[in-house]
Amino acid sequence: MTQPSRQPRKRIILGAYLGGVNHHTVWSAPEADSQIAFSSFRHLAQTVERGKFDFFFLAEGLAIRERLGRFFDQDVVGRPDTLPVLAALAGVTEHLGLIGTINATFNEPYELARQLSSLDHLSDGRAGWNVVTSFDAFTGQNFRRGGFLHRDDRYVRADEFLTVARQLWDSWPEDAIEADKESGRFLRPEHADAGRFAFSGKQFEIAGRFTTPRSPQGRPVVLQAGVSPHGRDFAVARADAIFSPFHRLDEAQEFYRDIQRRAARAGRPPGAVKVLPSASFVLGDTEAEAAERQREIARQQVSGRTAQILLEAVWNRDLSGYDPDGPLPDVEPDVEGPRIIQGRAVIHQDARQTAAEWRELAEAKGFSLRELAIHLFSRTEFVGTPEQVADRLDSFVQNEGSDGFILGSHLTPTGLDEFVDRVIPLLQERGAVRTEYTGTTLREHLGLPST
């Protein structure tokens, strides 16, 4: 185990997400249930609140993915709208933060700022927004703005979007409402213009009066998910936390320290921007049992057909004729043809280079097509007995890998039950996570300053 640094001991921040809209969720498992039924969202939220988690996290799915014009059965299909789900969860939880992923490319700032402020009111100060952007024209077809944004412009719009949202949230002074029943005066005279706003920019030209008085947190907590240079600068300037994909400690430390340096240059105090990677886990009564469970889950997540489809996103060719247990395709990616996979994020900009790197990796490791896909696209990072997983999670945070994790499971909605029952008590014993909620708002849970 890596020895902890001399930094003060940190409490691990914990969020939980409900799987869906990708191959990581094994919908065909006998014990799996719906990823869209409210009973599933409620079960997970109430389970992790029992474990004193900081927040529930919900991703979004704005388009049904297609392969050659038809959706494929390997992905879980369909995701209900984020804000109604979180509003419903506010009524069946008391302490848990409620963070939703909502796209700044396809929404409008007035209506989204009002919806998030309303969620903050309904939940007594537990609302959060994970800001994402998109340049995907396929997804954009579902919205009136389409995929008009160039890749470089998406953060320009997001930055202006957040500027407007903050102006709207701040347009009501905290003490604007007097509500004196005897005098009949509702607004204090000195705040007669409460809610009034005007904004003129390249993306938005709006003015009026914001209908929602100041919410318990003032501004909902803001997360950001991009890790490109633009995304990192946007996060340290605008966000309270950043959702990262880095799981190996060495690359996670490099990212964590880069975010702290950028935040300092942006004038943010130490610890002002939390780093929270997504993570999953597999438990066993012994280390060997956990490793065997991990192999079984990975093969459930990445079937032979799923492996072909995952590589088709880079090759842009029909690979259904290639043996999943055989070598990688011997043809080059089709970089000129229309996309045969639509709706999945394009994370490899140079397909030919990516294919060459994957062939080299497969040859060096002796991987088949499916084994390579499992290696590249599986998410399980913490595998072992409950004691081992608790130790590795704590060590990761204490050694500047992150400030915590957003945990998920391959199984909906009961996948985190055993984590709450078997790992949380061990983390609580060592003081790594809370035993009781001490604050009422999400900002207080995360140790963020009030606004």
Image: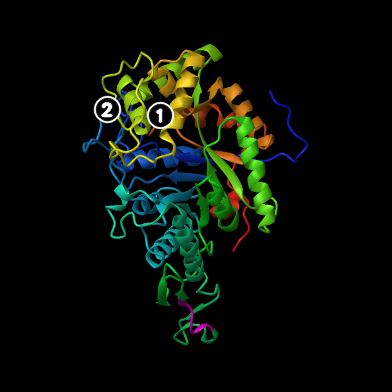
> Percent position (x, y) of residue 190?
55, 85
Q: Is residue 8 magenta?
A: no
Residue bearing the label numbered 2: 318
SS for dot 1: loop
* Front residue of 68 and 115: 68
SS for dot 2: loop
**What's the magenta region?**
191-198
Nearest to viewer (mark 2 / mark 1): 2
* Front residue of 145 and 430: 145
Q: Give the vertical position of 122 relative to 243 (above or below).
A: below
Q: Give the vertical position of 163 relative to 423 (above or below).
A: below
> Coloured how?
rainbow
In which image quadrant can residue 75 be found?
top left
Q: Is residue 447 visible?
A: yes
- Amino acid type of the residue that numbered disc 2 sits on in the rendered structure: Asp
Q: Quadrant of the N terminus?
A: top right
- Amino acid type of the residue that numbered disc 1 sits on in the rendered structure: His
Q: Give the label on residue 410, or none.
A: 1
> Percent position (x, y) of residue 249?
62, 31
* Front residue of 122 and 388: 388
